[in-house]
Amino acid sequence: MSSFPTSPEELSPQWLTDKLGYQVTSFHIEALGEGGGLLGLVTRLHLDANEGPSTLIAKFPTKTEGNRAVATIYDMYAREYRFYTQVAPNVPMRSPACYHAELNEQNSDFVLLLEDLQGFELGDQVKGCSVGQAHQVIQSIASLHRNTWQPEHITDIKPHDMPYQREGMVGGFLVGWPVVKTDFTAVLEAAITPQQIALLDTMPDQVNHLLDIIHDGPLVIGHGDLRLDNIFFAKDGNALVDYQAVSKAAPEHDLAYFITQSLSDDVRCAEDWVAVYHKYLTSEGLDYPLDTSRERYRYCALYLVCYAVIIAGTLDQANERGRKLAETLLGNSLRSLVELDALKLLSQ
């Protein structure tokens, strides 16, 4: 048992009053469905209070047993709790204000009370974004990385290349790749050659090697799931949400995931995005060679095709948006690898 609410039904005006620091007379709950890849239950609270915002977001563990088990294995609830309590207060990157956070380390129960991003519009990975919006996102993530460079002192946040991550990527690819080759043949054939498909057949044997190379260099606190579906846009900037995949990672991990899977071909090819990112990253004097960033970016882009394959291989294809999302991120990712000449790294 946890000493705090672990579902919307357990909330009370008194508990909210105690944690928010002002009187909450009553509230009602607006269901927002499942968030964070079906691994977190997200609701909007409408407050009758004498001060503070009229709405806020309350986030809890998912009620779906299988999804809860996945979240526990990958330490996802603790990751998000640690981001909001240890990282967010110390970096300028915009994320929802956290009004209260609690975590039960024994069973991974958690609750977050977060800012409701009124006036923002949620991005859409299927629709893509503009060049200007891509600049905003890259500037934001470069700010996070610059301010968490070599974060050895943040001991509670683990590296991305933990054993469970390595095993999950190998196992997930082994499941997803046959589905992709059967159900997404048009996407594959339009993007890569039969010889390149054969190279990707070897990915399960290459994951550990790729992760070793990627993590041989400076690390940062990375968002870990930087895609348009986790980014809110406003006229004056953006805010990133869903920090369940936060880890110590190569700085190019976030960049490659965003560029190769969320940007349409025309936007992706409109700029030298690695150079754009590097300029933002080093704007305050950080010493990090551009050539190093470019090479790590190629390896990250190659490794992250695993994400596209796993998602495409497991999404509900009967759902129209699910099918379009799978086609979009898979096609974007594969075409990016061709542009980067990154698939040949699998033959080295």
Image (cartoon, rainbow, N blue to C red):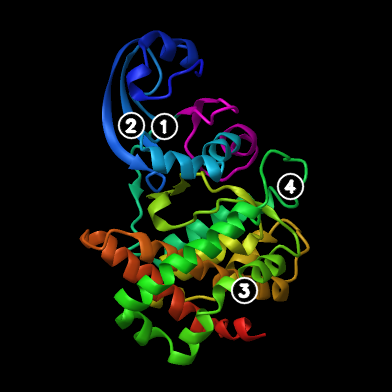
Closer to the chain start, of discs 4 and 1, is 1
Residue stretch rendered in magenta on the structure? 83-112
Disc number for residue 43: 2
Residue at x 42%, y 50% (from the top left corner): 230
Front: mark 3 or 2: 3
What kind of residue is marked 4? Pro
331 and 199: which is toward the camera = 199
Q: Secondary structure at mark 3?
A: helix
Residue at x 49%, y 70% (from the top left corner): 305
What kind of residue is marked 3? Gln
Q: Which residue is mark 4?
A: 151
Q: Secondary structure at mark 4?
A: loop
> Residue 269, can we see it?
no
Closer to the chain start, of discs 2 and 4, is 2
Front: mark 4 or 3: 3
Closer to the chain start, of discs 2 and 1, is 2
Front: mark 4 or 1: 1
Residue at x 50%, y 28% (from the top left corner): 109
Q: Tell me the distance, in whole angstroms, between the alpha carbons under discs 2 and 1.
A: 6 Å
Q: Hey, which quadrant is residue 256 in on the image?
A: bottom right
Q: Tell me the distance, in whole angstroms, between the alpha carbons under discs 4 and 1.
A: 27 Å
Q: 240 above or below 177?
A: above
What kind of residue is marked 1? Lys
> Residue 58, can we see it?
yes
Disc number for residue 206: 3
Q: Would you call the spot at circle 3 few (<14 residues within 10 Å), some (14-19), or many (20 or more)?
A: some
Image marks 2 and 1: residues in contact by CB distance under 8 Å: yes
Front: mark 1 or 3: 3
